[in-house]
Image (tube, helix red, strand yellow):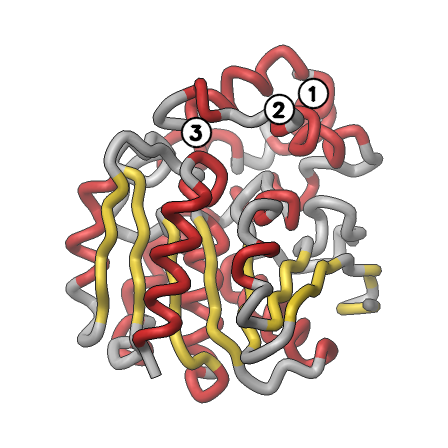
Amino acid sequence: MQLDGVKMRYLRCGSGPNLLLLHGLLGYSFSWRFTLPALGLTRTVYAPDMPGFGFSEFSNRLDCCFSASAGRLLRFMDVAGIDSCDLLGTSFGGAVAMIAAATQSFRIRRLILVDPVNPWSAHGRTLAAILGLAPVRPVMRTLGPQMRFLRPWVLQRLYGDVARISPGTLEGYSRPFELPGAFRATTSILSSWGRDVEAMRSIFPRIANLPTLLIWGDLDRAVDPNSAPFLQRQFNNSKLVMLKGVGHLPYEEVPDDFNRVVMEFLANQR
């Protein structure tokens, strides 16, 4: 589809009530390769590549702060004809999902948040602040796609057990980095990361009554698992599932367990 002046790619499968899956920073719809077939049995599942990620285009004119990204997600729903949906977001996508729900809560039936970025996690704050500095951003945009030797290390840190990394995972995530302009959206997001995370504190009264499922890996190095109870307290009707021995990508590391937890939540919450 065309959205905000750029071509945006998305995947859709299945039939039934709408479920929207939102990837994290440096991810794209590839993240959901084990999720789409399972959840598509009972849901119409949408998995967009947000602008600047995966195989969607990017423009330097796009505002990439958290709130602008949430507004773009809602406009994606408009163009795709999604009046309402269950919304699942992971990591950075989890933060965007919460902000989108706070903006138009009448369109979101339930939230599923997977290791979501939140104000109570200090993990990555310093690194994000450094990479978001104006002098650093052009360097990262130039060197980021060329630093192929770092990709296996980054991927391994996102898993609790590196033996669970399935064949083709590194190649799949690396493919978009070879495209012109890779990392432009990432550096734009990082430029306001600290302010945006702190600003999230104000949104929780508007989404407190949404039925919410929190899924976390207890070995997550990207978003602190100890922040999960603090985030859960912001919701009046929530469930927290902590997956033992699992890292930041539970939908890839233990997909059967992940899909079961999500399907049970969707089946039991009417």
Secondary element type, mark 2: loop
Amino acid found under the numbered disc labelled 1:
Leu
Frontmost residue, 186 versus 92:
92
How far separated are the C-alphas under marks 2 and 3? 16 Å
Report the side of 13 relative to 244 (left or right). Answer: right
Residue 158 numbered tag = 3
> Of tags 1 and 3, which is closer to the observer?
3
Tag 1 residue? 143
Secondary element type, mark 1: helix
Q: Residue furthest top?
A: 149
Frontmost residue, 91 versus 119:
91
Frontmost residue, 121 versus 211:
211
Quadrant of res 168: top right
Amino acid found under the numbered disc labelled 2:
Pro
Report the side of 64 relative to 121 (left or right). Answer: right
Instruction: Tell me where residue 246 appears, x and y as whole percent.
Output: 33, 33
Report the side of 151 relative to 228 (left or right). Answer: right
How far separated are the C-alphas under marks 1 and 3? 21 Å
Tag 2 residue? 167
User: Against 56, is 151 above or below?
Assistant: above
Is the residue marked by circle 3 packed among few (<14), some (14-19), or many (20+) residues within 10 Å? many
Quadrant of res 264: bottom left
